Image (cartoon, helix red, strand yellow):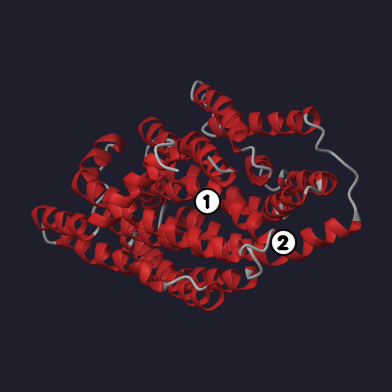
Amino acid sequence: MSYERRVILRHSLASVVALGLTGLTRFLYSAVVARRFGIEALGAANSLISQAFFLAIPLSFFAIALGKYASEFLGAGKTDSIRSITLPSFLLPLVGLLLIPLNLYLGILATLRGIQLTLRNFLYGIHRGEHYAYIITLAFVGFLVGFLFPNVFAPYLLFLGLIAVFSAAYLVRFDFVGKPRTSEIGLLISYSAFAFLGTLSGVFLIQGPYFMSEYLSSPEVAGRVSAILSAAFLLTYLPQILQSAIMPLFSYKYGRNESDYVKLLAEKTTSILILVTGVAVFVLMLLGREVLSAIFGFDVGSAFYLALMAMEVYIAYNPSIVALNSTAYVRRGTLVALLGAFAVFLSWFYLIPAFGAMGVMAGLILGYCLILAGVAHYARALLDISPRIYVPLALALLLQSLVFLSKFALLGGFLLFLAYNRKEITDGISLVKSFRGRES
């Protein structure tokens, strides 16, 4: 098995664990808090947590650049350069402690989340994603223990706190702390200036619904949005599983001047993600609303369907935007992400007061579709990635809209979707077999 395949397989398996558990934390947290403290308390708590996670992006300013250049330096055999960029990247999140006088939990959670994001990018950058999975698994135990305390923020404090402790121990144990050098720090700053804005835009689209719905409507609406998105956002861990595996390879191959590999990898992963996500969304539309309403104790409503469709669009464009950001075109990816986030932000001022949870999801669909259009354009022009890879996505969204007619009509649409993608299903099975060593 080639080195690239080993990295993808190892990182994908690690990400199934790490990102799966990370995504499960928000779902479990929302379910337990809703049952224990009520829907309004859930909305208020998730609003503050989302604000902290949003603020963690500037605190982890160097995180994406750290992962990118750590991978490039690894490909070039420059281990001293990796050590040079590690220390400043991990020290920056500590600036978040200055927020403590403003709000104790906001400052602590933002700081700890910034450390987590930095660690994640670093470990995947140096092709040690499995180590991140081990750390997340141990920290998840602390998250569960947190539910034993009466403090509504205890699960996240223990979860992120343990990750921060493990981060410090890891850097010392494996000798990744070195003296910063001007040349490498310059690379971090130059790349991060644009990658940061793109990341901030993306995180706003993930965390923004929680605190914007509380601000523009009420804690009750925020609680309903929290319940819906805590489930719908679990889908986004599908692309993150692959992203965590392929983003270091994008940079690794780019460092070796193998641009054709970037195009092929982006197209293949996009096709796989659209197929897998499409199937998952159909199944969740058929069964998910009733199950989710039973778990949270209230009807999540048809906004759940719009949330799933929004996540589907988000997932589809991710490989191409990652390819842009991992090579020489981070400015293009950032521009598109900013445009989408700004459109959502403006639309919410009308949609949320007028339509509540439905308005939140409608705004997300609008923003994600704009980003998809921009990403498809730049990926075609700069990386020669064909926009035809998004045709199955358009078909899936059209057929999934049948859910607003009846579940029976949706089931028929599901069968049509499977028939249309029969070749991709066969290719996907072949890919799984190749990872298992059945094909060369």
Given the image, on which type of amino acid does mark 2 rest? Ser
**What residue do we see at 37% from left, 53% from top?**
221
Task: Please state which of the two labelled residues, at mark 1 or mark 2, is closer to the viewer.
Answer: 1
Residue 124 at x, y percent in the picture: 63, 43
Task: Decide: few, some or many residues near mark 1? Use Cα within 10 Å; few <14, some 14-19, many ≥20.
Answer: many
- Observer able to see residue 201: yes
Q: Which residue is mark 2?
A: 192
Q: Which mark is residue 243?
A: 1
- Kindly indicate whether the residue at mark 2 contacts the one at mark 1 (C-beta within 8 angstroms): no
SS at circle 1? helix
Given the image, on which type of amino acid does mark 1 rest? Gln
Left or right: 11, with 278 as reference point: right
Residue 399 at x, y percent in the picture: 20, 63
**Is the residue 360 above or below the residue 86 in the image?**
below
Task: Decide: few, some or many residues near mark 2? Use Cα within 10 Å; few <14, some 14-19, many ≥20.
Answer: many
Q: Which mark is residue 214?
A: none
Left or right: 247, with 221 as reference point: right
Question: From this viewpoint, which residue is outermost toward the front?
Answer: 440
Residue 329 at x, y percent in the picture: 63, 70
**Is the residue 373 above or below the residue 161 in the image?**
below
Q: Nearer the viewer, residue 211 or 23?
A: 23
Q: Nearer the viewer, residue 349 or 54?
A: 54
Say whether disc 1 or disc 2 marks the residue closer to the N-terminus. Answer: 2
Residue 380 at x, y percent in the picture: 49, 75
Q: Nearer the viewer, residue 115 or 208?
A: 115
Q: Nearer the viewer, residue 324 or 256?
A: 256
- Specify the quadrant that holds the C terminus: top left
Q: CA distance from mark 1 to mark 2?
A: 18 Å
**Is the residue 16 above or below the residue 345 in the image?**
above
- Observer able to see residue 48: no
SS at circle 2? helix
**What residue do we see at 45% from left, 51% from top?**
239
